[in-house]
Structures are given as structure tokens and as C-alpha cells.
Image (cartoon, helix red, strand yellow):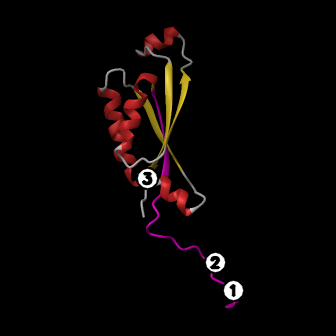
Amino acid sequence: MNKNLPNTKKTKNPNIKKLKVLITIVNRSKALFYTDLLEQYDVNMQMTLYGNGTANSEMLSLLGLAETEKVVILSIIKEEREKEILETLSEKFEKVKNGKGIAYTISMKSVIGVSIYKFLSNVRA
């Protein structure tokens, strides 16, 4: 091993927390309710996409669903808060009138730039 070469071994920064993308699909009429709810968990970036469900009326009535206009909320969350957020969403899906929905997460593997990471993770330092 050449001692003149710089050490290229990656060092982990203990201050860097992993981020996840939370995808939440709910009835369009509940979009504001769920975006406001998620802001309580240090979510600094959310994007709302509008869409329509594709199930036919027979399938909708079988599943007990009425509204076909949906919203997909993309939120960047800290991995350490994932369980807490998903449990809260699951509870709200059961208890809020017409508040049923789907929520799941996808891991983020990298972010380009420290300032972007700080923005997405809601770090104010």
C-alpha cells in the first residue's frame, strides 16, 4: 500500500440521518388535512400530485369507497420518524371520516449537496 496516496476510505458522519420518501395516497378532499398532519413531524418538503382512481363503480362499492379523485403526497421524512409517522397515518386512515388511504416509504440513497440535505432534513444550522 502506497503511503503517499490519500485515504479514500469513506467515513460516516454521525450527524447525518437517513431520509426516506413517504408516499401517501388519499381522497382529494383530505389533502390539506394530511399535509398539515405530516408537517408536525419535521417534514420540510412535500409535493402534492392530483389524480383519479381507476377502479370501476362496481369495484368501488365493493370496497366501500366513494371518491375517485385522489391526491398523491410525496414527503421527505427522517428515517428515525418513519415508524411513528406510519402509525399515525394508519390510525387516521381508520378514524377520520372519508380519510382512508395508503402510505409507504422508499429509501433515499443519496442527496447531492450539503445545503440540499439540510433543507430536506429540516436542519437549521
The outermost residue toward the left is 95
Q: Which residue is mark 1?
A: 5
Q: Residue 36: x percent and y percent?
A: 37, 37
Dot 3: element: helix
Dot 1: element: loop
Q: Residue 111: x percent and y percent?
A: 58, 57
Amino acid type of disc 1? Leu
For marks 3 and 1 on the same chain, the one whose residue lies earlier in the sequence = 1
Q: Main secondary structure of the magenta part?
A: loop
In the rendered image, residue 53 lying in the magenta stretch gets the answer no
Amino acid type of disc 2? Thr
**Residue pictured at 43% horizontal, 16% vertical:** 63
Specify the quadrant that holds the C terminus: bottom left
In the rendered image, residue 5 lying in the magenta stretch gets the answer yes
| Pick the front one: 125 or 12 | 125
Q: Which residue is mark 3?
A: 79
Is the residue 39 above or below the residue 27 in the image? below
Categorize mark 2 by other alpha carbons within 10 Å: few (<14), some (14-19), many (20+): few
Question: What's the CA distance linking mark 3 and mark 1?
Answer: 36 Å
Q: Residue 37: x percent and y percent?
A: 35, 38
| Pick the front one: 41 or 12 | 41
**Mark 1–mark 2 CB contact (< 8 Å):** yes
The outermost residue toward the front is 125
| Pick the front one: 47 or 96 | 47
**Mark 3–mark 1 CB contact (< 8 Å):** no
Q: Which residue is mark 2?
A: 8
